[in-house]
Amino acid sequence: MHIRLASPLPLVRRHSARDGFTILEVMMAAFVMIFGIVTSLTTLQFGMRTVDTARSMTLASQIMQSEMETLRLQNWTQISALAASAVIDPTTLISSASGSALDTMLTAVANRFTCVRTVAAISGRADIKLITLTVTWKGVDGRAHSLTDQTRYAKNGLSDYFYVSH
């Protein structure tokens, strides 16, 4: 009768030439890692460009709203006297009027924008003016963007009653 005793020590495994990674496996892992990094960077750039566009559109909207509010405070005589086309300085529309460091920053931001106001007569209606505001700017990627708003101003219309004369 033979009794077989289990060895108290585990068998030591010899290393063979087949152990480790092959060059093909290393290349595939490197490719997957590079693909992940490039995709992440591309997504990050796209996201930053989108955030810049959204912020700039908000500022452009605020510039147009400020100019529209200024126009609403004018009477028909003042609106009729406006030039057919004029470039509006956005730094006058975005300001805290305190001459502080905030104004310096606001001026730097506003200088990225150009605002053009056009005033046109509406055919057959001498008592209504079509006012168009167009704000343009360049994004962080150098692409040109623009935002346009139109309104009509009527003689003796609702807007004509919002001005205060001193």
Image (cartoon, helix red, strand yellow):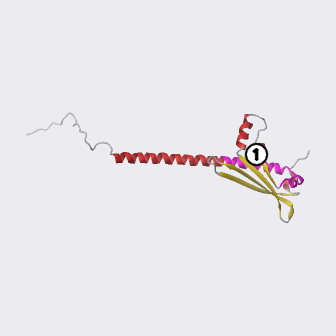
Q: Which residues are magenta?
A: 55-83
Q: Residue at x 73, y 55 (%)?
A: 148
Residue farthest to the right? 166
Q: Give the SS element for disc 1.
A: helix
| Residue nearest the viewer, comparing 151 with 121 | 121
Residue at position x 67%, y 47% from top?
56
| Residue 114 percent coordinates (x, y) | 73, 48
On screen, residue 143 versus residue 120, left or right, reads left
- The residue shown at (13%, 38%) is 4
Residue receiving disc 1? 90
Which corner quadrant of the image does residue 149 belong to?
bottom right
Residue 76 part of the magenta-drawn span: yes
Which one is nearer the viewer's eye here, 36 or 8? 36
The total number of labels drawn is: 1
Q: Main secondary structure of the magenta part?
A: helix
Instruction: Let me know if residue 154 is in the magenta part.
Output: no
- Placement of the C terminus among the 4 image quadrants: top right
Amino acid type indicated by mark 1: Pro
| Relative side of 8 to 37, left or right | left
Within-10-Å neighbours for mark 1: few <14, some 14–19, many 20+: many
Q: Position of residue 48 (x, y in %)?
A: 59, 46
Specify whether 159 is left or right of 7.
right
Which part of the image, by quadrant, shows the N terminus? top left
Residue sticking out furthest to the front: 142
Q: Residue furthest bottom?
A: 124
Q: Is residue 97 above or below residue 71?
A: above
Q: Residue 71: where, in percent of width, then height?
A: 82, 51
Residue 20 coordinates in the image, percent (x, y): 31, 42
